[in-house]
Every structure is written in structure tokens, then in C-alpha cells.
Image (cartoon, rainbow, N blue to C red):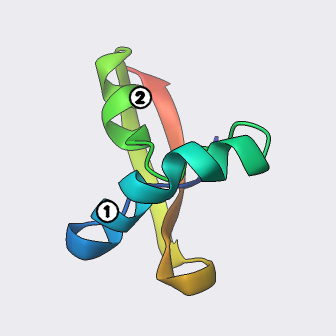
């Protein structure tokens, strides 16, 4: 089970990429530009996204379940 904020699309994604170095340092290694869904699938799991929502400042997030593929 995952609850994860992820990299945005377009301008939001570029913003996440730009702030990553400072953000990660200030927030104990948090990566606002992480491509979690792609990483889960690359690790050999199927990702069932149950709900998508926006966090602070419109950052995308999801609730999902990773299952062996």
C-alpha cells in the first residue's frame, strides 16, 4: 500500500526538478520529483491506483496498492 506524492506534469514537474536539491536537504531526503509509479512498475509490480489527489500547492499524489506482476 502506498500513499505518495509524485512529480507533477509540465511546469509543475519542472518546478519539482528545480527545487529537488534544496528540498531534499531541508526535508530529510524527500524527493518531490520522484516518479514513483514508474519505479514500482520497473521493480516488477503492478500498481493499482485507488485515488488521486492534490497536496499543498497542487502537488499530485495518489493512494495505491502494489502487487506482484
Q: Is residue 49 visible?
A: yes
Could you say which is closer to the camera, residue 67 or residue 2? 2
The quadrant the N terminus occupies is top right
Residue 57 percent location from the top left of the image: 55, 84
Q: Position of residue 3 (x, y in %)?
A: 64, 53
Q: Is residue 43 above or below residue 14?
A: above
Q: Residues within 10 Å of mark 2 (few under 14, many from 20)?
A: some
Rounded to the nearest angstrom, the CA distance separating label 1 from label 2 is 19 Å
Disc 1 is placed on an element classified as: helix
From this viewpoint, is residue 2 visible? Answer: no
Which numbered marker is on residue 66?
none
- Circle 1 packing at 10 Å, graded few (<14), some (14-19), many (20+), is some
Disc 2, SS: helix
Residue drawn at 50 percent across, 57 percent down: 19
Q: Position of residue 24 (x, y in %)?
A: 65, 43
Label for residue 40? 2
Residue 2, compared with residue 43, is above or below; it is: below
Which circle's residue, 1 or 2, is located before the other in the chain? Answer: 1
Question: Which quarter shows the C terminus?
Answer: top left
**Left or right: where does residue 33 sit relative to residue 2?**
left
Which residue: 54% across, 43% down?
21
> Where, by quadrant of the figure, is residue 46 drawn?
top left
Answer left or right for 54 relative to 17: right
**Residue at (77, 49) in percent of width and height:** 27
Name the residue tied to disc 1: 13
Amino acid at each position: 500500500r502506498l500513499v505518495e506524492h509524485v512529480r507533477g506534469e509540465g511546469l509543475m514537474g519542472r518546478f519539482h526538478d528545480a527545487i529537488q536539491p534544496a528540498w531534499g536537504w531541508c526535508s530529510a531526503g524527500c524527493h518531490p520529483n520522484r516518479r514513483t509509479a514508474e519505479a514500482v512498475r520497473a521493480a516488477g509490480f503492478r500498481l493499482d491506483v485507488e485515488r488521486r489527489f492534490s497536496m499543498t500547492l497542487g502537488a499530485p499524489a495518489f493512494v495505491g496498492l502494489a502487487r506482484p506482476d
